[in-house]
């Protein structure tokens, strides 16, 4: 009878078994795969039913591979390594890297550095996706991501800290004259306030009341309004460093509190990281990482 690929188990079931076999624990496997422990156990059970073979002995404190499961795991691990190598080789030939970043990071930090990136890595084509949504690296076909977040991270992800969310008050010199030190809150309250999705002004004034001022869904838009002299914004200092240095904005002082998050560079862990992806990863750390 000719071989038919239709007889193969589902890829999800094979992945669930391979990861569970490496960890010998459904909980650890669920963390790596980003699904529930029950979903992993169900996929492994479906695989065993499909094959008609018991792959694991279920123990009170984990799993143990059967003799047949041990041999199958070794073959599957080699197969997944081959798939990973083939995919990375294809990506390296294309030299295309897709990075998912927040909109404000894109406009204030990445776009101004694109020419420097092109000079440093002329053979790499960088594709940028600006979104605040959490990326699924496989589904969204994303190689790297920059997100405002905090540890811990799933074992399947590699994370590098870039910079903290240090918050400062900024305004255009056309709106506020340069002065020594930050103006007191009562003076700030008389100026137009620019709000974004974080709602930091309520925390600054320690109030739950609705405060007046224009509201934007992205910090980058609030900063554009501040540059246009339309009001005062609270933003991460890293996003306004260039405007402060050029005199387009004035630092009116610390917000008096910092967010409990920072900006991290993320990617999936891989035994065969791609050359182009590694190059962008290292460039981002060198360019944006805290000293």
Image (spheres, helix red, strand yellow):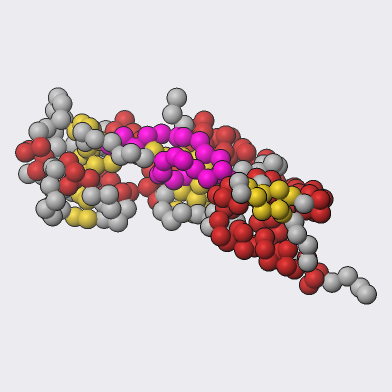
User: Which quarter of the figure is the C terminus placed in?
Assistant: top left
Which residue sits furthest front?
Answer: 60
Q: Position of residue 143 (x, y in %)?
A: 58, 49
Q: Is residue 178 left or right of residue 69?
A: left
Pick the front one: 50 or 191: 50
Q: Residue at (40%, 44%) from the top-left corner?
A: 148
Residue 177 occupies quadrant? top left
Q: Residue at (49%, 43%) from the top-left corner?
A: 153
Q: Is residue 95 left or right of residue 221?
A: right
User: Which quarter of the figure is the N terminus placed in?
Assistant: bottom right
Q: Establish if 249 lies above or below 95.
A: above
State yes or no: residue 155 in magenta.
yes
Q: Residue at (61%, 49%) from the top-left corner?
A: 60
Residue 16 occupies quadrant? bottom right
Q: Establish if 291 lies above or below 42.
A: above
Pick the front one: 135 or 130: 135
Q: Residue at (9%, 33%) from the top-left corner?
A: 184
Q: Position of residue 238 (x, y in %)?
A: 36, 35
The magenta-colored residue range is 146-167
Pick the front one: 84 or 45: 45
State yes or no: residue 289 in magenta.
no
């Amino acid at each position: 009878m000719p071989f038919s690929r239709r007889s193969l188990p589902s890829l999800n079931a094979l992945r669930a078994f391979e990861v569970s076999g490496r960890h010998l624990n459904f909980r650890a496997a669920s963390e790596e795969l980003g699904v529930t422990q029950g979903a992993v156990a169900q996929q492994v059970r479906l695989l065993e039913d499909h094959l008609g073979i018991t792959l694991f002995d279920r123990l009170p404190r984990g799993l143990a591979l059967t003799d047949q499961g041990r041999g199958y795991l070794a073959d599957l691990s080699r197969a997944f390594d081959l798939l990973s190598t083939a995919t990375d080789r294809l990506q390296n030939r294309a030299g295309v890297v897709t990075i998912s970043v927040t909109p404000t990071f894109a406009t204030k930090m990445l776009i101004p550095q694109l020419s420097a990136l092109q000079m440093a890595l002329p053979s790499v084509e960088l594709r940028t996706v600006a979104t605040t949504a959490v990326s699924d690296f496989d589904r969204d076909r994303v190689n790297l991501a920059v997100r405002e977040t905090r540890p811990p991270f799933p074992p399947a992800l590699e994370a590098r800290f870039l910079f903290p969310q240090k918050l400062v008050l900024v305004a255009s010199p056309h709106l506020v004259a340069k002065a020594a030190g930050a103006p007191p809150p009562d003076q700030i309250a008389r100026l137009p306030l620019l709000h974004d999705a974080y709602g930091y002004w309520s925390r600054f004034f320690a109030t739950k009341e609705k405060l007046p001022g224009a509201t934007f869904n992205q910090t980058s838009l609030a900063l554009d309004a501040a540059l246009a002299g339309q009001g005062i914004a609270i933003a991460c200092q890293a996003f306004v460093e260039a405007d402060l240095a050029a005199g387009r904005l004035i630092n009116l002082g610390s917000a008096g509190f910092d967010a409990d998050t920072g900006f991290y560079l993320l990617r999936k862990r891989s035994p065969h990281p791609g050359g182009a992806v590694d190059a962008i990863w290292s460039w981002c750390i060198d360019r944006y990482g805290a000293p």
